């Protein structure tokens, strides 16, 4: 597909990547209509937290996957789902392991390479819908891209398209970005506090084994250190870098065989634009790439006169286009 020339125009006050990134957390609220809670039991006995919008009968399901240290009831993502449900689709937001209101039962956290829970949800609900679309933000986009690329022959045929908003397709550049003082202060400190809080709570009922040094994990100051001291040894990786090489989805995009739309911004403080698959998107019959001048990380603030956020507008266009195709 040709690389799409973005028509997104940011409001004047939000022509800054950090303001865009922080805007939805500061100004956008959850929809007034509450979603219907549910849960999904995995094959290993864990439970995933689900939230539905089901406006009448529909043959289309849209599954929403959140990003790093977020959850299914994240305000902007839940609002996105509510908007899509207004188009007549059923929508499902799910919390990855350790991200729900209650911590999961097993020792496992979520990781960029682990798409098995997403795959299980797709396969389960494919029995009830004619078509499923995947909407994923940030790290959720990495996980979805790994599902579609690494597991390409096994992707359920009911999956008709994927929409990835600000996905860090190459994870080393994300960690490089987090070393910048402002990024560390605005974002990384929050990620580390949240991850260590979950780890601490899990130590009350989980034995992490001899491969994890609990005190060394407690001293972590960066996401890279948490990956190196906790996630890597738990999952059999030699180091955080070894894990990130395995988890990065960029090398697997060429294997994707369902329509996939990537929307990102030049001023995204988390993403290195040099790592975007521009040449691949030009040649691939399945990849769409839209790179906007502004938008930050999952921001894309709308003007007061705009009825929908830009990513909602683009997703609807993508659904209609991919359905026709």
Image (spheres, rainbow, N blue to C red):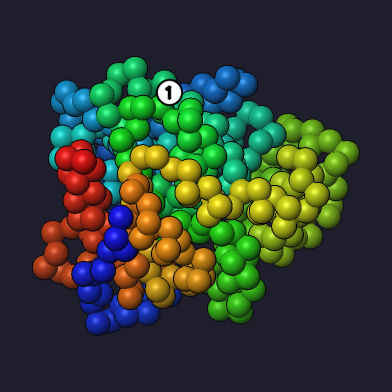
Q: Is residue 144 above or below residue 61?
A: below
Question: Can the viewer see residue 230?
Answer: no
Spot the residue most to the right. 210
Question: Can the viewer see residue 12?
Answer: yes
Q: Is residue 8 above or below residue 65?
A: below
Locate residue 108, reporting x and y percent. 66, 36
Q: Secondary structure at mark 1?
A: helix
Locate residue 51, reporting x and y percent. 36, 34
Q: Is residue 34 above or below residue 20?
A: above
Towards the viewer: 40 or 32: 40
Towards the viewer: 286 or 33: 286
Residue under the image location 60 percent in, 77 percent down: 180
Residue under the image location 88 percent in, 39 percent down: 210
Res. 282 image quadrant: bottom left
Left or right: 24, with 209 as reference point: left
Res. 63 image quadrant: top left
Left or right: 272, with 179 as reference point: left
Towards the viewer: 212 or 311: 311
Spot the residue most to the front. 283
Picture quarter with the C terminus: top left
Residue under the image location 25 percent in, 75 percent down: 10
At label 1, counting other C-alpha atoms closer than 10 Å, the crowd grade (few under 14, some 14-19, many 20 or more) is some
Picture quarter with the N terminus: bottom left
Left or right: 291, with 211 as reference point: left
Residue bearing mark 1: 123
């Amino acid at each position: 597909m040709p690389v799409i020339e973005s028509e997104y125009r940011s409001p004047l006050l939000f022509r800054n990547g950090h303001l865009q990134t922080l805007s939805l957390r500061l100004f956008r609220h959850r929809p007034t209509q509450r979603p219907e809670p549910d849960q999904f039991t995995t094959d290993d006995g864990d439970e995933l937290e689900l939230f539905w919008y089901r406006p009448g009968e529909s043959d289309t399901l849209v599954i929403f996957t959140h990003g790093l240290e977020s959850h299914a009831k994240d305000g902007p993502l839940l609002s996105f789902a509510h908007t899509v449900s207004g188009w007549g689709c059923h929508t499902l937001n799910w919390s990855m392991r350790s991200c729900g209101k209650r911590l999961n039962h097993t020792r496992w956290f979520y990781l960029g390479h682990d798409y098995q829970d997403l795959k299980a949800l797709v396969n389960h609900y494919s029995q009830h819908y004619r078509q499923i679309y995947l909407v994923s933000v940030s790290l959720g986009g990495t996980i979805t891209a790994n599902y579609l690329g690494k597991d390409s022959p096994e992707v359920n045929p009911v999956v008709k398209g994927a929409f990835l908003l600000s996905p860090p397709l190459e994870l080393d550049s994300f960690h490089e970005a987090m070393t910048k003082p402002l990024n560390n202060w605005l974002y990384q400190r929050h990620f580390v506090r949240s991850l260590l809080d979950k780890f601490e709570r899990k130590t009350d009922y989980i034995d992490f084994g001899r491969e994890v040094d609990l005190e060394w994990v407690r001293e972590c100051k960066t996401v890279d250190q948490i990956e190196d001291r906790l996630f890597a040894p738990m999952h059999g990786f030699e180091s955080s870098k070894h894990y990130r090489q395995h988890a990065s989805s960029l090398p697997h995009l060429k294997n994707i065989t369902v329509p996939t739309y990537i929307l990102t911004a030049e001023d995204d403080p988390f993403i290195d634009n040099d790592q975007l698959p521009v040449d691949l998107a030009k040649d691939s019959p399945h990849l769409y790439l839209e790179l906007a001048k502004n938008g930050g990380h999952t921001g894309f603030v709308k003007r007061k006169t705009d009825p929908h956020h830009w990513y909602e507008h683009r997703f609807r266009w993508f659904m209609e286009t991919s359905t026709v195709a």
